[in-house]
Image (cartoon, helix red, strand yellow):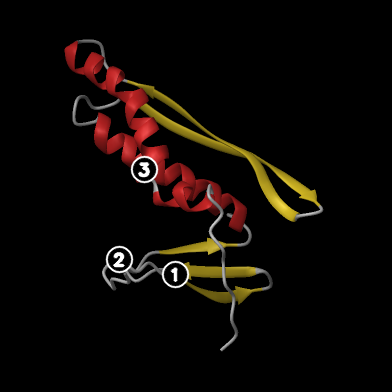
């Protein structure tokens, strides 16, 4: 069930000692190593994915006055190796007073739940523990 339109990919190129430029097929680039570590980007990916879902669903009702998503986790080093534990995504969203804001506020908990349970590809991949294959060409 592989659809090339659904394929996602990124390319990393070494630009210095422990520094890389990541790029995608749409022309976007981001530095990895000094400003953002791979763990920062993983957490940002989780937050960005669910933020986008929730924003699309709630902003149909009202434009938020404030919209912030924080993602935190503990780095653990144990017998299983290095990994993150206790990943928490925290939303702080404010909508304007009035009927439209009330509608958006009422929708917010369900939108967050829907993103977590079904929509967010990033957390839906991380949470069940998808195997990662490596190869050398």
Examine the image and state in which quarter residue 55 appears.
top left
Mark 2 lies on a secondary structure that is: loop
Residue 41, x across and y down, in percent: 54, 53
- Which residue is at 29% across, 73% downward? 4
Q: Which mark is residue 129?
A: none
Do tag 1 and tag 2 residues touch (Cβ < 8 Å)? no
Front residue (pair 100, 107):
107
Q: Earlier in the sequence, mark 2 or mark 3?
A: 2
Query: In the image, residue 126 lies at what x, y percent?
Result: 53, 51
- Which residue occupies the foreground of this view, 24 or 46? 46
Of the two numbered discs 2 and 3 in the rendering, the one whose residue sits closer to the viewer? 3
What is the x, y in percent for residue 124? 45, 48
* Residue that numbered label 1 is attached to: 10
- Rendered position, 85 above or below 11: above
Question: For numbered disc 3, what is the local secondary structure?
Answer: helix
For the residues marked 3 and 1, what is the alpha-carbon distance in whole angstroms? Answer: 23 Å
Rendered location of residue 110, percent (x, y): 33, 27
Q: Could you tell me if the residues under marks 2 and 3 are in contact, i.e. CB atoms within 8 Å?
A: no
Residue that numbered label 2 is attached to: 6
Find residue 113 and report its image quarter: top left
Residue at (18%, 17%) from the top-left corner? Answer: 100
The residue that mark 3 highlights is 118
| Front position among marks 1 and 2 | 2
């Amino acid at each position: 069930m592989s659809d090339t339109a659904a394929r996602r990919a990124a390319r990393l190129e070494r630009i210095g000692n422990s520094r890389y430029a990541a790029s995608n097929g749409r022309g976007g680039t981001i530095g990895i190593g000094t400003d953002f570590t791979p763990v920062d980007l993983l957490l940002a990916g989780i937050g960005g994915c669910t933020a986008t879902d929730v924003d699309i669903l709630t902003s149909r009702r009202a434009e938020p006055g404030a919209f912030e998503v924080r993602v935190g986790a503990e780095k653990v080093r144990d017998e299983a190796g290095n990994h993150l534990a206790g990943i928490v995504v925290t939303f702080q969203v404010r909508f304007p007073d009035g009927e439209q804001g009330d509608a958006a506020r009422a929708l917010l908990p369900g939108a967050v739940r829907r993103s977590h349970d079904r929509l967010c590809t990033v957390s839906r991949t991380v949470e069940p523990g998808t195997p990662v294959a490596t190869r050398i060409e």
